[in-house]
Amino acid sequence: MYKMIVCDLDETLMNDDGTLSAGNTAAIQAATAKGVYFVPNSGRSYTSFQNDLAQMNLKNQPHQYTISYNGGLVLENQDNRPLIINAMPYDLAKVVFEAGVATPAAATHVYTQDVLYIYHPTADDSAYLHNRGVQFEEMNTADFSQFKDMNIMKIIMALPTMADRKSLAKRVAAVTEADQLAVTYSSDRYVEFNPAGIDKGTASVQLGELLNIKPEEIIAVGDNDNDLSMLNAVGLPVSVANGIDSVKAVAKYVTNADNNHDALAEIINKFIL
């Protein structure tokens, strides 16, 4: 019996326009009514999907949980109470940030525990964030010392092509140790940097341990590179129909529906209800 679903948001649960469908909402409510935990597991900040949690009847609820920042932060929904904080060391974050600043085409995102800051925001990236309810503060200086006393959860860069993203990742690799960072790609726009060993899979297992849920009792649902860690960590890895090939390759089930046609409802109806 599956006791928890950890689910990516963008291009997995959410429609392409950033909305949560009525069909997926009803399925989530039916699953939680049966006592199954539904845990959004996103690269985004928890602040950006509070309205979606409200639609699921999970906002500000005790004994319900979210995972943000690719595993950087695990919260209980009531009062957004931090349970696990997997922050990035300041000196490492500074090196990654400087690589982004040195890339003229990049919009460089600094995710602190509660606020997103962006250096050199671009129109395309800002529109993408706006559609998903993501608020941010624009950085007008590249002085990274402003983050010295904050928890830095991750740093990501929006770039127009995968070649650009991989080139930036190589430049970061050249100035950091090989075992310092976890590097992933998401939404066909971002290269993401978390501390090594911190990812969606690590956080899923950590939360499962807190709830006395074994990895084999967890369903993970995703579509992209940064979801692979959680798919590899659980008993039932699932790809939505629009998932990339590497995600489909590790999935034990691939939905018939894509993210725009209630893929999560298909999963819940098949494996939970």
Image (cartoon, helix red, strand yellow):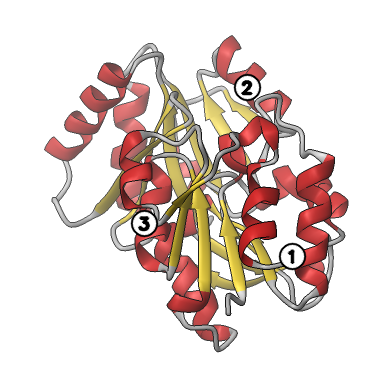
Q: Of the residues under marks 3 and 1, which one precedes in the sequence?
A: 1
Q: Residues within 10 Å of mark 3 (few under 14, many from 20)?
A: many
* Position of residue 266 in the picture relative to residue 232 (left or right): right
Q: Which residue is mark 1?
A: 80
Mark 3 against mark 2, which lies toward the viewer?
3
Amino acid beneath label 1: Asn
Q: Which residue is mark 3?
A: 229
Q: Of the residues under marks 1 and 2, which one precedes in the sequence?
A: 1
Amino acid beneath label 3: Ser
Give residue 260's position: percent from left, percent from top. Answer: 67, 30
- Residues at marks 1 and 2, CA–CA distance in whole angstroms: 25 Å
- Residue 128: which numbered mark, if any? 2
Q: Where is 255 relative to 132, above or below?
A: below
* Position of residue 184 in the picture relative to residue 141 (left or right): left
Give residue 186's position: percent from left, percent from top. Answer: 43, 35
For the residues bearing labels 3 and 2, Cβ distance under 8 angstroms? no
- Residues at marks 3 and 1, CA–CA distance in whole angstroms: 24 Å
Label 3: element kind: helix
Q: Residues within 10 Å of mark 1 (few under 14, many from 20)?
A: some
Q: Residues within 10 Å of mark 2 (few under 14, many from 20)?
A: some
Residue 63 in which image quadrant = bottom right
Q: Of the residues under marks 3 and 2, which one precedes in the sequence?
A: 2
